[in-house]
Image: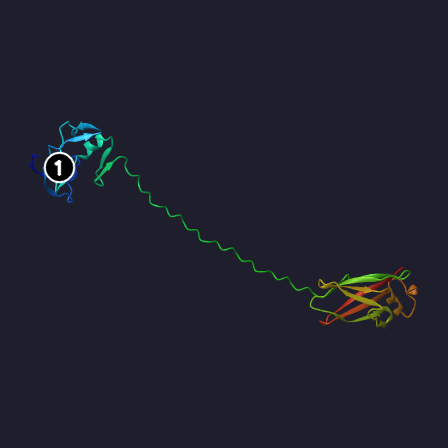
Amino acid sequence: MKKRMIVVMSLLMVFAFTAGVVANPAVQTITANLAADFKFVVNGESWQPKDADGSNLVPIVYNGRTYLPVRAIGEALDVKVDWEDATRTVILGDAPAPVEEPVEEPVEEPVEEPVEEPVEEPAAETAIAPAAGEINKNAPADGSFVVTWGDATKVTGVAAAAPAFGLNFDPKEGEHYTITDNGDGTATFVIKKEFAGLLPVPIAVVPDGAELVLTVKFDNGKELNYSYKVVS
C-alpha cells in the first residue's frame, strides 16, 4: 500500500465536509495514511467513492483503523447524510426529533369545602295549644289541647277556677283529665266531660260566656292557663 504522510484536520477528510467544520479548538492535528489501494463493493458491484466535484475519495488509515468518507458511503447506500454546524453533528438518515421539555401541569391546591357548623335548633319552650276552647252546656263532651314539653318532663298539678264566680276546683287526673305522652316532645291533655261535674250547679244553668280556667303546672316551674268557655 502506497503510504503518504498527510496532516488532516479531524472530520475534514473523514466526513468530507467543508473546511469550516474544523475551525474548533476540539479538533486535533493527526498524521494518517491515505489508503488509495482500498477497493469497495456495494451491493455486489464495484464502487468508487467520489467527492461532490467528481474526484475520487480514498479512505484514511489511522492507528490501525480505517476511516471512510461518510457522505459518499451514505449516498451509495441511499442514506441521507447531513451536517448540523451549530452542534457539530453528523446526521445519518432523519434528524432526531426535537426534545420537548416536559410541561409541568400546574398543581391545583385542594379547595377546602367550608365546614358548615351544625345549627342548633332553639330549645322548644313549654307551651299548650290551643290556649282556649269551648264546652257545650247542652251536650258536654271531652275537649283537648296539645302540650309541648320544652324542658319540662311532666305535669306536677292541675288547678281549676271560675273567676267570675270566685270558685276554685281541684280536678283529679284520670277522673277529670288525662295526659298522654306522644313520644315526640309533646303530650295530649284531654279534659273529660266529667270536669263539668266539679261545678256546684248543673252546667246547663251556667250562663253562656262563663269562663272556666285550668292552670297546668310543670316540673320546670312553669304554669300555663287554658280557658274553657261555656256555650250553648
8 is higher (above) or lower (below) than 110: above
Q: Quadrant of residue 47?
A: top left
Residue at 18%, 30% in the rendered image: 41
> Could you tell me the amino acid type at mark 1?
Ile
Most extreme residue toward the front, as rendered?
Answer: 44
Q: Where is residue 131 in the image (x, y as percent from the top left)?
A: 78, 63
Q: Residues within 10 Å of mark 1 (few under 14, many from 20)?
A: many
On the picture, is 212 further left or further right than 147? Answer: right
On the picture, is 95 further left or further right than 231? Answer: left
On the picture, is 134 further left or further right than 116? Answer: right
Q: Position of residue 24 (x, y in %)?
A: 16, 42
Residue at 93%, 65% in the rendered image: 205
Count of numbered labels shown in the rendering: 1
Q: Position of residue 187 (x, y in %)?
A: 75, 64
Question: Tag 1's secondary structure?
Answer: strand
Q: Where is residue 175 in the image (x, y as percent from the top left)?
A: 85, 69
43 is higher (above) or lower (below) than 141: above
Q: Quadrant of residue 45?
A: top left
Q: Which of 221 and 94 is in front in this view?
A: 94
Provide the residue designation for mark 1. 60
Q: Which colour scheme is used?
A: rainbow
Q: Which of 65 and 23 is in front in this view?
A: 65
Q: In which quarter of the image is residue 225?
A: bottom right
124 is higher (above) or lower (below) than 36: below
- Quadrant where the image shows the C terminus: bottom right
- Quadrant where the image shows the N terminus: top left
